[in-house]
């Protein structure tokens, strides 16, 4: 039986370093190629030696697909293509292709130029890697080669995020990447066809969470920011340059306008100006409201939000600062956090998920003394708030996507093992499908049942209808009798008469014969007459004839009687029938073996 194999090299029972290898119909596909934010050593990148010990990945992989531009999904791409070695096609959407190299270059600067790490990709490698990228349009079927085809669907989450449907022959897999099933202020909700894949590979970051209403969260967020500003405090909001940043900027911009507030809002420069430029450029990827109002007012041209300079961090008085990155593991957000951490008037609002090992994760878990570089400790006195403005699907959203796509099997990645376990149980219970959650380096094998499409002749369909069968219903399979013809690589089910005509063949009659021995002292004609009388009484509604040539006919069945040469008073009854009367022939032979009633 054909099978599909799925092996996570990253994001198996873990968040970060997404990299999944799928083997389907003899093709090998890499889904995402991310890095882990919680590590600075070898564990940062996926372990590509799992695929090839030494040598290039080009020989093994047919293509690489990147779902969106977050570094935990694309951060290892230049390392994989330029340092390990891969020259094949890399697919991603247009916005991802535009934004990905900016984030990679920014991360390279922090890692190499500021931290001085050596085993890392260069600016040139990022450029060379991006030359191998082929952009994808939504809902466009792309033929990777003669057998492998892929199609992208809108995933919400961040600008340009896509889910992919991968198909080889009749086998298929859907990979969600990260997605969001609820629309927000700047993006729409994820959507996919009812494509019934063999496996749906879904993220499960918030596998056990069902989030409260968005409006309540937004109200709480604005209230906390406002209170902190009123008492003269500074508010730090660590964000990644794209995604939640734009969402929260739109929220604060409209609030400041409504409340006529004067406290400055800053955005750490560089990346975000570029980011907003891309939001304007790819306006078609945003939600309907932004697209409609775009002509009168561009939501991404902010009046109240100004570019941030690092000297502003020491300015007196209240302010709100959006700074990158979002988990406080490096960069400007960490610098500002260190400066403001000692004042209880100040506040840090963490708007999204933080990976284990990052400062963000530590302070959310209540750590008040932090060990920084060079053995220095930092006392955390400022208020720490967590508000989930995450753009990941919650448990309800994941279930909603399963209903949409109707997969035959489910596989969870990009989540914590305990939470996955809980969701796995829920999915199996509600949908009665198998759900898998492999760890990194562990392979899940799913046997597929490929369906072969067959065209059916109109005459055969009409004949079936004429027999009074129920009307065709896709949910209720029914058996059709006909002859299967393979012509020009396609299959067709036709009536046997049509098949003979099309193939220029003569019809051959196939008949079955059966001998039954009967103890009967009468003459042969007499025994035959008694058989005729007996069958007349048993088989009502059948055409039974006693012919002059000494045979009895029941439909197409011929019955003859002769005396046995070996034994006196023993008759040999010969039955012969065509295959159409197979059931009736079997019934008659069983009936006659029991003998004839004595009263005849």
Image (cartoon, helix red, strand yellow):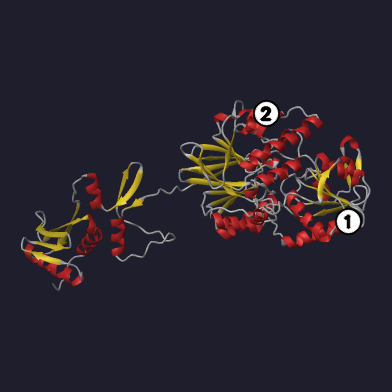
Is the N terminus in the top left, top right, bottom left or bottom right quadrant?
top left
Q: Position of residue 226 (x, y in %)?
A: 85, 58
Q: Nearer the viewer, residue 556 or 69?
A: 69
Residue placed furthest toward the top: 55
Q: In 3D space, how far apart are the residues under numbered discs 2 and 1 (Cα atoms)?
A: 45 Å
Callout 2: SS: helix
Which residue in the structure is indicated by mark 1?
228
Are the residues tagged 2 and 1 within 8 Å (C-beta)? no
Q: Position of residue 399 (x, y in %)?
A: 61, 57
How many marks overall?
2
Q: Is residue 506 left or right of residue 428?
A: left
Instruction: Please report the residue visible at 52 percent of the width from the left and 49 percent of the height from the top.
Output: 198
Marker disc for residue 125: 2
Instruction: Please report the residue visible at 69 percent of the width from the left and 46 percent of the height from the top.
Output: 279
How many residues crowd around disc 1 within 10 Å: few (fewer than 14), some, or many (20 or more)? many
How many residues crowd around disc 2 within 10 Å: few (fewer than 14), some, or many (20 or more)? some
Q: Position of residue 481 (x, y in %)?
A: 30, 55
* 2 or 1: tag closer to the N-terminus: 2
Question: Relative to 426, does residue 67 appear above or below in the rendering?
Answer: above
- The answer to whether any part of residue 221 appears in the image is no
């Amino acid at each position: 039986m054909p099978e599909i194999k799925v092996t996570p090299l990253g994001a198996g029972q873990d968040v970060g370093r997404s990299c999944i290898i799928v083997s389907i119909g003899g093709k090998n596909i890499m889904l995402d190629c991310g890095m882990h934010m919680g590590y600075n050593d070898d564990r940062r990148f996926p372990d590509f030696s799992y695929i090839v010990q030494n040598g290039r990945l080009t020989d093994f992989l047919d293509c690489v697909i990147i779902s969106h531009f977050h570094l935990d999904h694309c951060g290892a791409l230049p390392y994989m293509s330029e340092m390990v070695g891969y020259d094949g096609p890399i697919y991603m959407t247009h916005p991802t292709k535009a934004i990905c190299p900016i984030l990679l270059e920014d991360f390279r600067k922090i890692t190499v130029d500021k931290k001085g790490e050596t085993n890392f990709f260069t600016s040139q490698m990022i450029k060379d890697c991006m030359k191998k990228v082929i952009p994808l349009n939504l809902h466009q079927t792309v033929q990777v080669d003669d057998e492998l085809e892929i199609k992208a669907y809108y995933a919400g989450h961040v600008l340009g995020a896509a889910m992919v449907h991968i198909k080889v022959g009749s086998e298929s897999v859907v990979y969600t990447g990260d997605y969001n099933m609820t629309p927000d202020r700047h993006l729409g909700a994820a959507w996919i066809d009812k494509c019934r894949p063999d496996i749906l590979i879904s993220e499960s970051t918030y596998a056990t969470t069902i989030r409260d209403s968005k409006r309540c969260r937004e109200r709480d967020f604005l209230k906390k920011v406002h209170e902190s500003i009123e008492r003269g405090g500074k508010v730090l909001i660590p964000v990644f340059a794209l995604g939640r940043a734009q969402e929260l900027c739109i929220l604060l911009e409209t609030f400041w306008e409504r409340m006529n507030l004067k406290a400055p809002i800053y955005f750490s420069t560089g990346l975000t100006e570029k980011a907003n430029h891309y939001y304007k450029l790819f306006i078609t990827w945003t939600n309907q409201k932004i697209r409609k109002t775009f002509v009168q007012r561009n939501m991404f041209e902010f009046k109240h939000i100004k570019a941030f300079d690092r000297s502003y961090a020491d300015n007196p008085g209240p302010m709100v600062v959006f700074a990158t990155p979002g988990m406080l593991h490096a960069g400007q957000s960490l610098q500002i956090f260190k400066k403001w951490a000692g004042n209880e008037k100040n506040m840090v609002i963490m708007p999204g998920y933080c990976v284990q090992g990052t400062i963000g994760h530590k302070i959310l878990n209540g750590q008040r003394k932090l060990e920084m570089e060079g053995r220095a400790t930092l006392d955390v006195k400022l208020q720490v708030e967590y508000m989930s403005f995450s753009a990941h699907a919650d448990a309800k959203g994941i279930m909603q996507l399963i209903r949409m796509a109707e997969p035959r099997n489910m596989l969870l990645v990009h989540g914590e093992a305990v939470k996955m376990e809980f969701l796995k149980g829920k999915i199996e219970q509600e949908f009665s499908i198998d759900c898998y959650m492999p760890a990194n380096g562990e392979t899940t094998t799913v046997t597929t049942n490929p369906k072969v499409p067959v065209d059916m002749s109109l005459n055969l369909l009409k004949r079936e209808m004429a027999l009074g069968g129920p009307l065709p219903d896709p949910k209720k399979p029914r058996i059709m009798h006909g002859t299967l013809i393979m012509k020009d690589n396609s299959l067709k089910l036709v009536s046997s008469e049509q098949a003979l005509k099309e193939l220029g063949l003569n019809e051959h009659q196939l008949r079955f014969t059966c001998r039954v021995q009967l103890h009967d002292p009468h003459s042969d004609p007499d025994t035959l007459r008694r058989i005729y009388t007996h069958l007349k009484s048993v088989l009502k509604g059948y055409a039974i004839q006693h012919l002059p040539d000494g045979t009895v006919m029941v439909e197409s069945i011929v019955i003859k009687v002769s005396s046995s040469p070996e034994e006196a008073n023993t008759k040999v009854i010969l039955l012969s029938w065509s295959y159409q009367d197979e059931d009736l022939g079997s019934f008659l032979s069983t009936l006659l073996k029991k003998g004839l009633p004595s009263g005849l």
